[in-house]
Amino acid sequence: MLDTLRQPLERGQVTIHRAAGSATFPCRAQLVLAANPCPCASAAGDTACTCSALERRRYGSRLSGPLLDRIDLRVDLPPVTRAAWFDGVGTPESTETVARRVLAARAVAADRLAGTGYAVNSQVPGRLLRERWAVPRASLRLAERALERGALSVRGFDRVLRVAWTLADLAGRALPGTDEVAEALGMRLQRAAA
Ligand SMILES: [Zn+2]
């Protein structure tokens, strides 16, 4: 049933059909999914894991390709070590500091998008992104290669562009460069060892 999320994720609205008719509601949400790398929930490569390759693959396939194609940031989280747990390592910045940086980046994006009816990068249609704010081809080479070898879908390409713009806004850069595109692509192509 996770796949029913595809429409709201893509269109920002959800349509509910009932016998008496159908109704459409706004649905701009930030979806955060979490999954273990395998059914026994051991960390990837953990010797305690006894799951077979087939079991791991079957478990991973519960997140369908079309759904994953709509997930922009995929991050592997290594297990917290005991030392880090006690020392509090891993929280170098306060939420407040990060929030200030996010607000600043959103203000830059809102300035750029002024007059378009869009406020944040994630809302901008792919075509507008490619035509009006075209990223230089030289910066896109990695993403183009991923598209050619089938590792990236056309939808995924647009989503990489949006994330690259957000990374540029966060870094205070006027345009995404090779680094931002590579980072956006890396997060998209990353998938827990399944
Ligand atoms: Zn396992």
Image (spheres, rainbow, N blue to C red):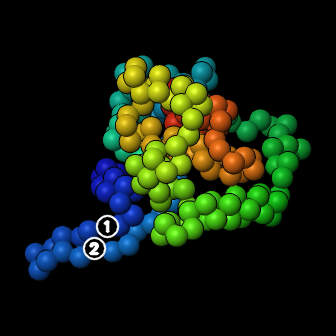
| Residue 33 seen in the figure | no
Residue at 73 percent across and 39 percent down: it is 80
Residue at 65 percent across and 44 percent down: it is 175
**Residue 191 image position (x, y, % from top left):** 51, 32
**Residue 26 image position (x, y, % from top left):** 38, 72
Q: Nearer the viewer, residue 10 or 5?
A: 10
Is disc 1 surrounded by few (<14), some (14 to 19) or many (20+) residues within 10 Å?
A: some
Q: Of the numbered discs in the image, which one, if any, rests on residue 177?
A: none
| Residue 93 seen in the figure | yes
Q: Residue at the left extreme?
A: 19
Q: Residue at the bottom extreme?
A: 20
Residue type at mark 2 is Thr
Q: Is mark 2 within 8 Å of ligand 1?
A: no
Kindly identify which residue carries mark 1: 14
How far apart marks 1 and 2 lie (CA) works out to 6 Å
Residue 155 position (above or below residue 38): below
Residue type at mark 1 is Val
Q: In the image, is 57 to the left or to the right of 96?
A: left
**Residue 161 image position (x, y, % from top left):** 52, 43
Is disc 2 surrounded by few (<14), some (14 to 19) or many (20+) residues within 10 Å?
A: few
Kindly identify which residue carries mark 2: 24
Q: In the image, is 11 to the left or to the right of 107?
A: left
